[in-house]
Amino acid sequence: MAAQLEEALAESSQLVQSSGGVFEVEDRGTLVFSKRQLGRFPADDEVLSILRAVDAGVSLDEAKRQAAENVPEPISFMNWLSGFFKRTQAR
């Protein structure tokens, strides 16, 4: 994700390792995404969508709400694993 954000926004990023399943994204000291708060990892392009909306003048709360609208319903681990194997076998 860091590489995707760096490429899309032409800015550097920093990975800060932690423990306990914490996954948070901050931009200039502002919490943009928190796995702890939402109980999930971000969907593809969710963080980028939030950052772009904020840069366009949308409030952070509204940007998060808009980005969350496009997040697909979570799937169970077993369904994910089944899809993973299907994709792997198709190659």
Image: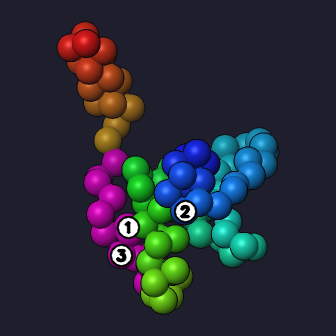
- Contact (CB < 8 A) between labels 3 and 1? yes
Residue at 67% across, 69% down: 27
Kind of element beneath mark 1: helix
Which residue is identified by label 2? 9
The label on residue 68 is 1
Total numbered labels placed on residues in the image:
3
Q: Is residue 76 left or right of residue 59?
A: left
Among numbered discs 3 and 2, the one appearing first in the sequence: 2
Residue at 31% across, 69% down: 69
Residue at 40% across, 50% down: 44
Which residue is identified by label 3? 66
**Residue 45 image position (x, y, % from top left):** 41, 56
**Marks 1/2: CA–CA distance:** 20 Å
The label on residue 1 is none
Q: Of 20 and 51, which appears nearest the observer?
A: 51
**Residue 68 image position (x, y, % from top left):** 38, 67
Name the dominant secondary structure of the magenta segment: helix
- Contact (CB < 8 A) between labels 1 and 2? no
Q: Is residue 59 above or below residue 80?
A: below
Q: Of 44 and 6, which appears nearest the observer?
A: 6
